[in-house]
Image: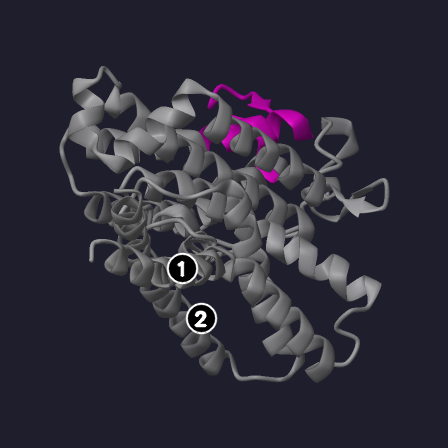
C-alpha cells in the first residue's frame, strides 16, 4: 500500500523535472526562436554587416542589464540608469568641447582616457547617491531611483540648456581628439564596444560566482535579515550594486556619444525598461536572490534581436513597445511558474526518497 503513492508520484516528478528544465532554458529557446523567425521574415537579417550592427545594439542593452541584474538580485530596482546614460554622455561631450574653466583665466582640457575616467566616476557617484538614499535614509529603491532619474535628466538638460553638444572631434593642439574610437573603432575586426562588453561581462560573472561579494549579493536578495545576522555587510553590498549599475550606465553614455560624435540630453530615455526586460528574461527573479550574468547577456540578445528584427520588418514603434511589454509580462509569469514548479518537484523528490 505504501509503495503505490511513491510509484504514482515518480512519473509526475519526472515530468515536472522535464518541464522545469525547459523553463530554465526558456531564454535560449526564445533566442533560437527569434533568430529563426527573423532570418525567414526579414531579408539580409543574417548578413555580416547586420549581425555586427545588432551586436553593437545588444552591447548597450547588455551593459545596463548586467548592472540591473545585480540590483534586482538584492531585491531592488534601478529606474535611473537611462537618465545616467544621458547625463554621462553630456559630461563627456562638455569635457571634449569646453574642458573645465577654473574661472581664473585658465581652462583645463583632458585627453580621451581622462574624459572617460571622469565620466565613469560621475556614473559611479550617481549610483552611490542611489545607494545612500536606500541604505542610510531607508528610501524605497523604486522611489529613490525614480527621484534620481528626474534629477539626472534635469542636470543633463541644464548642462546645455537642452541643446546638443555636436561635433565631438576635439582639437589636436588641446589633446582632446580620438573620442570617436570608443564607439566607432574596431579591434581585431570587432567593434571596441563588444570587447569592452566581453571584459565587463567576464568580470561580473567571475564576481558573482567566485567571490565572497558575489555570494553576499545573492544572500542579501535571498533573505536580507538572515544575511545581516550572519555578518554580511548588507548596506555595503547594496551600495556596490547601485554603484556598479551607475558604472555600466556611464559606459553606455560614453559609447553612444562616441558613436554619434554628439551628446544629447534626452539620450537613454526608457533604456531602463530594456535593461529590466533583458535581466528578467534572462532568469533574474524580481523577488531577488536568483539570476546569472550569462542568462542576462542572452536575454539582452533576445531583446536586441527582437527590436532590430521588428525594425527591419517595418513594424511600427508603437507595436514594438506593446511587444516588449508583453515580453516582460510573460517572462515574469514564467519565472513565478518556475518557482512554484521547483518547490513542487522538490517536495515530490523528498517524498519519493522518504
Q: Residue under circle 2?
A: 324
Dot 1 crowding, Cα within 10 Å, few <14, some 14–19, many 20+: some
Q: Is there CB contact under 8 Å for labels 2 and 1?
A: yes
Q: Is residue 312 visible?
A: yes
Q: Residue furthest top?
A: 231
Q: Quadrant of residue 216?
A: top left
Residue 21 is situated, as x and y percent measured from the top left of the image, at 47, 56
Q: Is residue 99 left or right of residue 324?
A: right
Q: Is residue 79 left or right of residue 266?
A: left
Q: Is residue 295 left or right of residue 269?
A: right
Q: Residue at the spot x=27%, y=31% of the render? A: 220
Looking at the image, residue 217 lies above or below residue 67 = above
Looking at the image, residue 183 lies above or below residue 229 = below
Question: Residue 127 versus residue 303: which sits nearer the camera?
Answer: 303
For the record, the magenta segment spans: 97-122
Check if residue 252 falls in the magenta segment.
Answer: no
Q: Residue under circle 1?
A: 273
Check disc 2 and report its element: helix, strand or loop.
helix
Residue 182 is situated, as x and y percent measured from the top left of the image, at 70, 41
Amino acid at each position: 500500500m505504501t509503495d503505490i503513492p511513491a510509484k504514482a508520484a515518480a512519473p509526475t516528478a519526472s515530468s515536472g523535472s522535464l518541464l522545469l528544465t525547459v523553463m530554465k532554458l526558456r531564454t535560449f529557446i526564445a533566442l533560437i526562436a527569434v533568430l529563426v523567425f527573423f532570418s525567414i521574415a526579414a531579408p539580409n537579417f543574417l548578413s555580416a554587416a547586420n549581425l555586427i550592427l545588432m551586436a553593437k545594439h545588444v552591447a548597450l542593452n547588455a551593459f545596463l542589464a548586467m548592472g540591473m541584474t545585480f540590483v534586482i538580485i538584492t531585491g531592488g530596482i534601478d529606474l535611473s540608469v537611462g537618465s545616467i546614460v544621458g547625463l554621462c554622455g553630456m559630461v563627456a561631450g562638455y569635457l571634449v568641447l569646453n574642458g573645465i574653466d577654473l574661472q581664473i583665466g585658465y581652462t583645463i582640457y583632458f585627453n580621451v582616457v581622462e574624459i572617460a575616467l571622469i565620466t565613469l566616476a560621475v556614473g559611479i557617484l550617481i549610483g552611490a547617491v542611489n545607494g545612500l538614499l536606500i541604505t542610510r535614509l531607508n528610501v524605497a529603491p523604486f522611489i529613490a531611483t525614480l527621484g534620481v532619474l528626474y534629477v539626472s535628466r534635469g542636470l543633463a538638460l541644464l548642462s546645455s540648456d537642452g541643446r546638443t553638444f555636436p561635433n565631438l572631434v576635439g582639437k589636436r593642439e588641446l589633446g582632446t581628439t580620438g573620442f570617436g574610437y570608443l564607439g566607432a573603432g574596431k579591434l581585431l575586426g570587432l567593434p571596441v564596444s563588444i570587447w569592452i562588453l566581453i571584459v565587463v561581462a567576464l568580470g561580473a560573472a567571475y564576481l558573482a560566482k567566485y567571490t565572497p561579494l558575489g555570494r553576499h549579493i545573492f544572500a542579501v536578495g535571498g533573505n536580507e535579515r538572515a544575511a545581516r545576522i550572519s555578518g554580511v555587510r548588507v548596506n555595503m553590498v547594496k551600495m556596490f550594486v547601485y554603484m556598479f549599475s551607475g558604472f555600466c550606465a556611464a559606459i553606455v553614455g560614453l559609447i553612444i556619444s562616441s558613436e554619434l560624435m554628439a551628446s544629447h540630453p534626452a539620450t537613454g530615455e526608457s533604456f531602463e525598461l530594456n535593461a529590466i526586460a533583458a535581466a528578467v528574461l534572462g532568469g533574474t527573479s524580481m523577488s531577488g536572490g536568483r539570476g546569472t550574468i550569462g542568462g542576462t547577456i542572452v536575454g539582452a540578445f533576445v531583446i536586441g534581436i527582437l527590436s532590430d528584427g521588428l525594425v527591419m520588418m517595418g513594424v511600427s514603434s508603437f507595436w514594438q513597445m506593446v511587444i516588449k511589454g508583453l515580453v516582460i509580462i510573460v517572462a515574469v509569469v514564467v519565472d513565478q511558474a518556475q518557482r512554484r514548479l521547483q518547490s513542487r518537484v522538490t517536495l515530490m523528490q523528498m517524498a519519493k526518497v522518504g
